[in-house]
Amino acid sequence: MKTSYLLCGLYVLINLANSDKRNFRIYFDEFAIKYKVPDIFEKVDCHLVQLNNRSYVNGEMILKRSVGDLNVRTIMEFWKPNSQIKTKLYDVRLDGCNLLRSLHKNKLFNLYVKSFKKHSNVILLCPFKANYSYKMVNWFLDEKDLPPYVPLGQFRTITEYSTQQRLAIRIVVHGEVLENQ
């Protein structure tokens, strides 16, 4: 009898946690490719769309040659509303191929990788193939994947991808954590 009460209680708690509404939303006002190496990329295209109170990113990449090594440097800065003081949340360097092939210890990076995989037209793994159209369709950062409380404010990320110890592409994202209305 106690087991059935325990199971019912766990079921109710799981449903409450899953249905917990977030009091914030993520808004991107910039998602741009600021640098790319023309001898590696045949095509790199990225569009930011605002629809139904959500920011979506659509992108496509075609490589001229296969890429078997990928190093990533990513920086995220955050500042609270009405403040000029920036806080660096992280500044890390990672083996991008290793990150895609295994779960990373950092929950935030796992969130990004899982989210990208969900909205990609292919399972993202190294080596990346030449002459293949890699697409990301209607990608967004789902607030339900984030902790229930995230402070309001602005953020900027700069992510640089390198191959063969050479910077290949730089992506700059700027946005805000806004109060959900």
Image: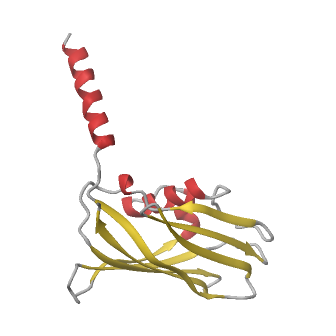
Task: Specify the quadrant of the image occupied by residue 38.
Answer: bottom right
Does 95 sit left or right of 79 as displayed? right
Q: Foreground residue, 93 or 77?
A: 77
Residue 50 placed where, x, y %? 49, 69
Residue at point 26%, 54% (across, down)? 148
- 124 in relation to 8, above or below: below
The quarter in which the C terminus is drawn is: bottom left
Task: Specify the quadrant of the image occupied by residue 135.
Answer: bottom right
Q: Foreground residue, 151 or 65?
A: 151
Residue 69 placed where, x, y %? 64, 73
The quarter in which the N terminus is drawn is: top left
On the question of residue 126 being in view, the answer is no
Residue at point 62%, 63% (across, down)? 136
Q: Foreground residue, 113 or 30?
A: 30
Residue 87 placed where, x, y %? 26, 82
- 144 in relation to 24, above or below: above
